Amino acid sequence: MASCFSYALVSVSDPGIVGSQRLTMRERSSETYTMRLGKPVITRDIPQEDRFEVPTFLKETGVVAW
Amino acid sequence: MNVPVFLPGGQPYGLLEVDSREPRDFSEGDTEFLRTYATTLGPVIDRLYRARRLQAAQERFRLVVENALDYVIFVTNAEDRITDWFPGAEAVFGWTAEEVVGQPSSLIFTPEDRANHVDEDEIETARREGTAPNRRWHLRKDTTRVYIDGIVKSLHGVDGEVGGHLKIGQDVSERRKTDEALRESEARFRRMTDSAPALIWVTDAEGEVTFANMHYDHTFGRPAAQMQGRGWEEIVLPEDLDQHYAAFLEAFQARALQSRDARARQDGPGALAALRGRAADGRCRQFPRLHRLQRGHHRGPARGW
C-alpha cells in the first residue's frame, strides 16, 4: 500500500499544496482511514467527526464536508 | 467523500476525494458516481504508468544499441529477413538500415558458407536450442571480410512461437588475424626446429620446458610433448641427473654457452648426449637448448635424424 499521499486537488484555495502536500499513512486522517477501509467514506460535517483527525491544511481551506 | 482507487490486481493507489465547504449529505447517487469513476481511474492510471515505463525502457534500449558501435546488433523476423539494423551493424558491415531492412540475413554470410547452408543451419540450431554460436568470417558491403564472434538468439512471440532472431556479435578480425599470425609463426618455428638435425627445446624463465622438437620422439621413443615441464628428468640417467641439472642451472643463470655430457636412458642406459645450451635474449628469459646426440659415443640403436 502507498506509504503516503500526495495531493492532486484542483479546486482548493491554495494550489501550492498540489504535488507537495504529503500525508503519511501513519497519521489518523480521513485519507488513511479510507485506504485501510477500502470503501467510500463520507464525512457530513467535521465537528461531528470522531473517526479521524482533520489536517490543518484542509481546515484552512474551509472544507467541512467530504 | 473519499473513494479509494485501486490498480488492476487490487493494489491500492490513492483516493478520489470530493470536498465541500458546506456541511453536506452525499447521496447514494453521488457515492455510486464516484465509485464508478474511481473504478475506471485505476486501469487508466495503470496504463499511463505502463506506457511511461515502456517508453523509458525503449529509450534505454535505444541508447544502448545506438551507442554500442563496436557490436553488431540486428533483428530478423520469422522469415529471417532483417527488421532492425542498428548503428553498430552499419559501422561493421557498411550497409545502412535503409539498404538491408527487408533483406535476408544471409546477406552477410560468405558465398562459401551460403553454399554449405551455414546460414540455414545456424537459424535451425537457434530455433532448436534457443541460441546458436556465430563465430566465422562474414561479408561486408565492400566484399571484404570481417570475423564476428557472437551469438544468434531466438525471439519468441506471445504465442511462444519463434518470431525472429536477435544477432549480437563483435568484430574480432584484428584479434583473429593476430592469433592466426601467431599460430603460423609457431608452426614455422616448429618446422624449422624439426628440420634441424638436433634436439632443440625451449624453457621459460623458471627453466621449465615449454617446447621440444620432434627429434625427442625419434631419439627417446616418447612424444616431444612429454618433455614439457621437467620431462628431461625422465630421460637423463638418475646417476647423472644431479650433475646434469647443476650444469643446466649454471648455464641458465649465466645466460651462457654450456657444454656438458650426460647419459640418456634412450633404449637402455649408455646413450650419450653432449649438451649445449645458449640463453636467448635476456628480456624474454628463455633458454633454447641444443642437444646433439654424439653418434660416435652412442651405444644404443639410434632412431631418427
Image (cartoon, rainbow, N blue to C red):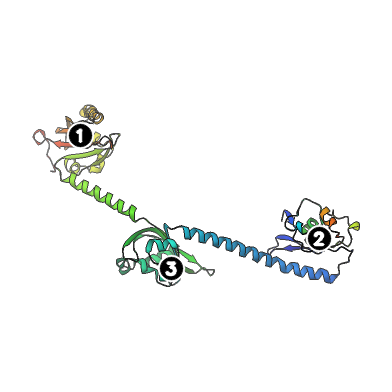
In x, y percent, where is residue B168? 43, 60
Element type at mark 1: loop
User: Label 3 sits on what residue type?
Assistant: Ala
The secondary element bearing badge 3 is classed as helix
Q: Residue shown at 30%/54% (left/top)?
A: B177
- Asked if marks 2 and 3 fall on the same chain, the answer is no
The reply to whether the C-beta atoms of the residues labelled 1 and 2 are less than 8 Å apart is no
Q: Foreground: B33 or B275?
A: B33
Name the residue that disc number 2 marks.
A13
Q: Would you identify the image quadrant in which residue A1 lies?
A: bottom right
Tell me which residue sits at (43%, 68%) in the image. B97
Residue B171 seen in this snapshot: yes
Eyeballing the image, is B82 above or below B191? below
Circle 1 residue: B278
Label 2 chain ID: A
Find the distance from the CA under tag 1 to the CA under tag 3.
60 Å
